[in-house]
Image (spheres, grey):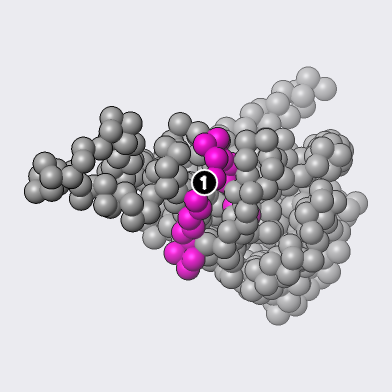
Amino acid sequence: MARFSALLLVVVLGVSSPATQAHLLKVFAFAEGNRIDGTTYFVGGIPAAGAGVEVMSEDGRLLTTLVPNSAGEFSYEAKSQTDHVIVANTGDGHVARWTVPASELTGRHTDSADQDALNMLSPVTASAATEPSNGELAILVEQSVARQIRPLREQLIAYEDRIRLRDIIGGVGYILGLFGLAIWWRQRHRSDS
Amino acid sequence: MAHIPDGVLATPILIGGAVVSVIAVSIAVRRLQPEQIPQAAVMASAFFVASLISVPVGVSSVHLILNGLMGLVLGWAAVPAILVALLLQTIFFGYGGVLVLGVNAMNIALPAILCAMLFRGPLQRAGQRGSFVIGALSGALAVAMTGLLVCTALALSGNAFVPAAKVLFATFVPLALVEAMVTGATISFLKRVSPELLFVRESAHGTL
């Protein structure tokens, strides 16, 4: 028993090192303008490049099937301003879901036109060019804010993903407690009979 | 892989898996010897923790399942150990799901019981090298069976069987090899240094 416990301790210390990977497929995607950019990966940071990614409308209609690149990234141009459900599937029972809410989509294409619009805002040309309308300005602000906070959101997700030592110790503690309870139960039954 | 998440399988499969698991647990609890409980706890902890070390293989990622080892060491007691560890993996790590717990437990526990039935007898009589071979066979067979059960569960729920089987085959063959090595080494080690860990009470396991 002591040997077993020693082995277990080694394993626990081993897995608590940052190099360990967990075994859970995840997918997330954020919208910038009307383009949905996302990443699919196994928790711990390994990209799930071989996974299939399905983009579905909110009523479950399949819009398209994407193949992520080697970094697990994919991109989709939304055609309608509705909720989009992204489903990543490796085909062997690993499935992950993410919903891009309609409110994240601005209903405008993020292409070179945006860059032009941004250039128009630069101080040099702003006076000469026509001022963007309030609506356009709102969209531009929304897009650049989305771009700015994206790394922050990614960091938050990565932070949430991490399996911490206390989870591991907690789980092992629960197991020992439950089986201890079983022993106590058995002992009580024995002394009764 | 072995941890199918919620929302993938069809309802009849979920119910079927839950029923099989409940039956298996009730049989196991009736056969459980008090002396086995601490062992079951240690094996459940090992199973719980082993899932954290996963290695990317092909499009997927795999980790040790250890159900062959659990079956050989624990016999029927492997069933509650697996169920408890799976439940805690769901709660703490988000692997699998609560609704599919029955199916996942069945996929992992049935091969463990089969290994116990097939190999515990020969293991008791085996020598040093023999016990390594038995352990290795048991480790590989248990993983292969789990893979087959996962494929079947996915196929019965309307997923295409062939692509799932291809992915699983590609990931399970290397896993089966590693699992065979680990189980073989552990079993022959246990057999050499403390055979009493493997056969707590001979009469209790003779009935398998």
x then y, percent, for residue B27: 86, 40
Q: For this view, does B7 lie left or right of residue A88?
A: right
Considering only vertical position in the picture, is A14 above or below A121?
below
**Is A142 or A5 nearer to us in this picture?**
A142
Residue B160 picture quarter: bottom right
Q: For this view, does A130 lie left or right of residue B163?
A: left
**Type of amino acid at the residue the image marks with label 1:** Ala
**Magenta extent:** A69-89
Considering only vertical position in the picture, is B128 above or below A72?
below
Report the residue at 43% width, 57% height from top: A45
Magenta span includes B35: no
Q: Which residue is mark 1?
A: A78
**Is A63 or B179 nearer to us in this picture?**
A63
x then y, percent, for residue B48: 58, 48
Report the residue at 52% width, 46% height from top: A78
Report the residue at 52% width, 62% height from top: A68
Magenta span includes A83: yes
Q: Residue furthest right?
A: B207
Q: Residue furthest bottom?
A: B129
x then y, percent, for residue B82: 69, 46
Q: Is residue A36 visible?
A: yes
Q: For this view, does B83 lie left or right of residue A148?
A: right
Mark 1 belongs to which subunit? A
Residue B194 picture quarter: bottom right
Residue A98 picture quarter: top right
**Quadrant housing the N terminus of chain B:** bottom right
Q: Residue furthest top?
A: A192
x then y, percent, for residue B176: 68, 70
Q: Is residue B31 visible?
A: no
Report the residue at 31% width, 49% height from top: A114
Considering only vertical position in the picture, is B101 above or below A72?
above
